Image (cartoon, helix red, strand yellow):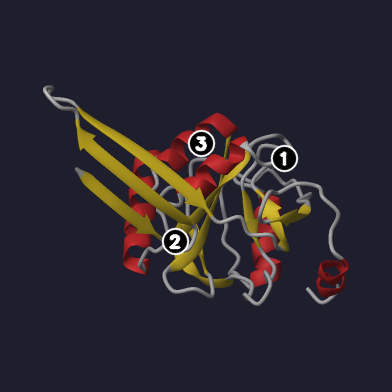
Amino acid sequence: MDFRVTTDFKVKQISFAFKVPFTENTTRFTWQIYRDPNAWCTGIGSQCKDGRHVLFFDYDSKELKQLLGDLQFLQERWHLSNAYIFAMDRENSYHAIILDKFSVSKAYTILRDANSDPGHRESVKKVRGHEWLLRTSPKGERDRPKWRGILKSKYDEHEISTAHKRFIEVNYGVPKLIYKEEDNIDELPVIDYNTGNRTDMEKPKEFLEAKKNV
């Protein structure tokens, strides 16, 4: 018999396995209990105006060296361009953005190759609008993400999103880089969402007041 409980700040996983008597079979039950945060914040979506998506990554409990190795692997495997890395205010927690544009199915396939947060990867199936979201504002007592650096790539083969590129340049002071092909689309909606369920439930007054200062 094997009984295990593993936890991190987002999920608790309980596994229970036992061997079936008089057989060679083992039966395993696994329960996952997710935290259900309820905080409003502001972010950007992965979807561009033409329906394609840039690549958003959410890394939790990953040292920077591990993150860089993962992104370098993806750059080589999929011939992806530069990766922009943002540090969260929690140890070993990062966001990353690659500006190359893909269909939602191709973007999902690439994200499945990443050792990033599976919950964030799968969120595209649940989020209204079917896109990935990354937070750009403070959330409760937590600070907004801070730009950490760029992981340069030798590849520049895909069209990139001008709107996402300009957003991180203007809002995070990211250096301006030249790409062979941009879509020259300026429109990028900023999204208010609830981190618990990402619904359109009414925003609390304190969030609306705080947003004035963001």
- Residue 80 shows up from this direction: no
Determine contact: label 1, label 2, CB under 8 Å. Answer: no
* Front position in the image: 53 or 205: 205
Q: Determine whether, in the image, residue 17 is placed left or right of residue 213.
A: left
Residue 6 picture quarter: bottom left
Amino acid marked by disc 2 = Asp
Mark 3 / mark 1, whichever is N-terminal: 3
Tag count: 3
Local secondary structure at mark 1: loop
Quick check: 158 above or below 139? above
Task: Return the residue at label 3.
Answer: 108
Residue at the image position 84 percent from the left and 59 percent from the top: 203
Front label number (2 vs 3): 2
Give the percent coordinates (x, y) of residue 84: 51, 61
Local secondary structure at mark 3: helix
Residue at the image position 59 percent from the left and 45 percent from the top: 54
Determine contact: label 3, label 1, CB under 8 Å. Answer: no
Task: Return the residue at label 1.
Answer: 128
Give the percent coordinates (x, y) of residue 44: 69, 54
Q: CA distance from mark 2 to mark 3?
A: 19 Å
- Residue 151 shows up from this direction: yes
Question: Label 1 crowding class (10 Å Cα cut-off): few <14, some 14-19, many 20+?
Answer: some
Give the percent coordinates (x, y) of residue 146: 57, 73
Task: Return the residue at label 2.
Answer: 60
Quick check: 214 above or below 41? below
Amino acid marked by disc 3 = Tyr
Quick check: 41 above or below 132? below
Local secondary structure at mark 2: strand
Q: Where, quadrant-wise, is the N terminus in this rendering?
A: top left
Disc number for residue 208: none
